[in-house]
Amino acid sequence: MENLAESQFNRIANHDESVAVQGLDDLFQWASETVAEGLDSRSRKAKDQQVRRQVLNIIHRSADLQAKAKHADELAYLQRRVIALQAVVSERTDEVSNLKQAIMVQYFGMQRIPQLEERIIQLETERLQKQKDDEDCKHLINALAKVKKERDYLEELVTTNESENARLANLLKEAREEVTVLKNRRWWHLLFPQKQ
């Protein structure tokens, strides 16, 4: 970058010098006439060359100052461009950092996929087992309801049988009492029945 600025500065200086020298012929002529008054040709020529050198030095200094100012402007512009580019690079770096972070999160998420698939299969198996258990529970509840109905029916039968057994026990008791009474009777009692 410095070589580019230096080459531009040299081109500008050479161009400005040639333009400045070409347009200063009248100035050199006036300066040599002013210096030439009262001098011989050799002194006049030396003085003329000296004046020319001074004018060229002034022109070169002016061109140098202009080139330096232009170079400073270009440098300031390039610095502003570099700062802008650094800001863009910083933004891109942040974006890349965010993307890397997202990629890492996705990578670790992808690493967990087999475990999650196994867990899904396990949960699906548990859900199916729970459904089967619920169906078995419904069947058992239905069977229990049937058993309860049958138990109630059997309880009614037992209650009926107990009451029938009690009646039959009373009948049996009465029959035994009659048998006992009949056994206690003698044959002659048939002839003479006893009044009760």
Image (cartoon, rainbow, N blue to C red):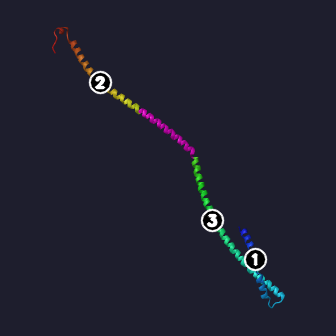
- Give the secondary structure at mark 1: helix
Alpha carbon separation for disc pair 3 and 1: 37 Å
Question: Counting other residues with Cα less than 10 Å from the Cα at mark 2, is it few (<14), some (14-19), or many (20 or more)?
Answer: few
Q: Quadrant of the N terminus?
A: bottom right
Task: In the rendered structure, find residue 84 and report the number of the disc placed on it.
Answer: 3
Q: Nearer the viewer, mark 1 or mark 2?
A: 1
Q: Amino acid type of disc 2?
A: Glu
The region drawn magenta spans: 112-140
Considering only vertical position in the picture, is 156 above or below 14? Answer: above
Comes first in the chain, label 3 or label 2:
3
Secondary structure beneath disc 3? Answer: helix
Name the residue carrying label 2.
162
Residue at (26, 21) in percent of width and height? 167
Q: Amino acid at mark 1?
A: Val
| The disc label shown at residue 68, or none | none
In this orientation, which residue lies closer to the viewer: 151 or 64? 64
Badge 1 crowding class, 10 Å Cα cut-off, few under 14, some 14 to 19, many 20 or more, is: few
x, y (%) of residue 157? 32, 25
x and y percentages locating residue 175 in the rendered image: 24, 16
Q: Nearer the viewer, mark 3 or mark 2?
A: 3
Q: CA distance from mark 1 to mark 2?
A: 144 Å
Label whose residue precedes the other's in the sequence (1 or 2):
1
Q: Quadrant of residue 142?
A: top left
- Residue at 51% from the left image edge and 40% from the top image edge: 124
Give the number of marks.
3
Q: Which mark is residue 19?
A: 1
Q: Is residue 74 above or below residue 143?
A: below
Query: Which of marks 1 and 3 precedes in the sequence?
Result: 1
Q: Foreground residue, 85 or 142? A: 85
